Image (cartoon, rainbow, N blue to C red):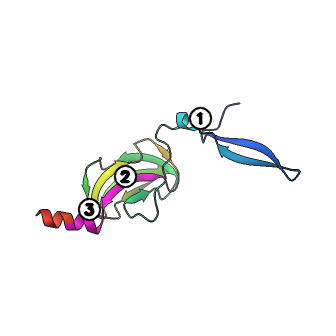
């Protein structure tokens, strides 16, 4: 049987004589379905920028190694024919991109990781 695009399988099991059906991710098949994976943003880390909604990445406005300012556009997403621009929550350097143009994403998927914050601002002032 073909797996859905999520890589999830239904597993039937019995607990105390009661049949149960649970969803589990098939790790052997899932990596083939999405080469990027679905890394989630860390809600505690301000530099970990997550998707605010499910949709498609229309375009990236930054590249790895770019210096970004708080409020600078990072990427454009589309959902239900409406486009949304995701902006940088902090000043810093783009350490890695979690998505590419055309990727389908879910709420909370990592879009961009920015290394920065107070340490970054202090380092740039010292370098001047």
Q: Nearer the viewer, mark 3 or mark 1?
A: 1
Indicate the quadrant containing the N terminus: top left, top right, bottom left or bottom right: top right
Disc 1 to disc 2, how far (Cα)? 31 Å
68 in magenta: no
User: Label 1 belongs to which residue?
Assistant: 28
Q: Nearer the viewer, mark 1 or mark 2?
A: 1
Q: Are marks 3 and 1 in contact (CB under 8 Å)?
A: no
Disc 2 to disc 3, how far (Cα)? 14 Å
Q: Nearer the viewer, residue 69 or 12?
A: 12
User: Label 3 belongs to which residue?
Assistant: 69
Describe residue 124's horizontal placement relative to residue 23 as left or right. left
Q: What is the secondary structure assignment of the residue under circle 1?
A: loop
Q: What percent of the width, then of the height, locates residue 62?
A: 30, 50
User: Label 2 belongs to which residue?
Assistant: 75
* Lower sequence index among marks 1 and 2: 1
Q: What percent of the width, then of the height, locates residue 38?
A: 50, 47
Q: Nearer the viewer, residue 90 or 55?
A: 90
Q: What residue range appears in magenta?
A: 107-122
Q: Residues within 10 Å of mark 2 (few under 14, many from 20)?
A: many
Determine whether 100 is above or below 42 in the image. above
Q: What is the secondary structure assignment of the residue under circle 2?
A: strand
């Amino acid at each position: 049987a073909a797996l859905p695009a999520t890589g999830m399988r239904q597993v039937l099991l019995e607990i105390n004589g009661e049949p149960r059906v649970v969803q589990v991710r098939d790790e052997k098949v899932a990596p083939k379905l999405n080469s990027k994976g679905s890394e989630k943003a860390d809600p505690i880390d301000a530099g970990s920028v997550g998707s605010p909604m499910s949709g498609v990445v229309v375009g990236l406005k930054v590249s790895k190694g770019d210096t970004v300012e708080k409020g600078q556009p990072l990427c454009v997403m589309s959902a239900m024919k409406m486009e949304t621009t995701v902006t940088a929550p902090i000043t810093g350097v783009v350490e890695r991109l979690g998505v590419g143009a055309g990727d389908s994403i879910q709420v909370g998927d990592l879009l961009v990781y920015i290394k920065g914050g107070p340490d970054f601002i202090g380092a740039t002032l010292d370098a001047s």
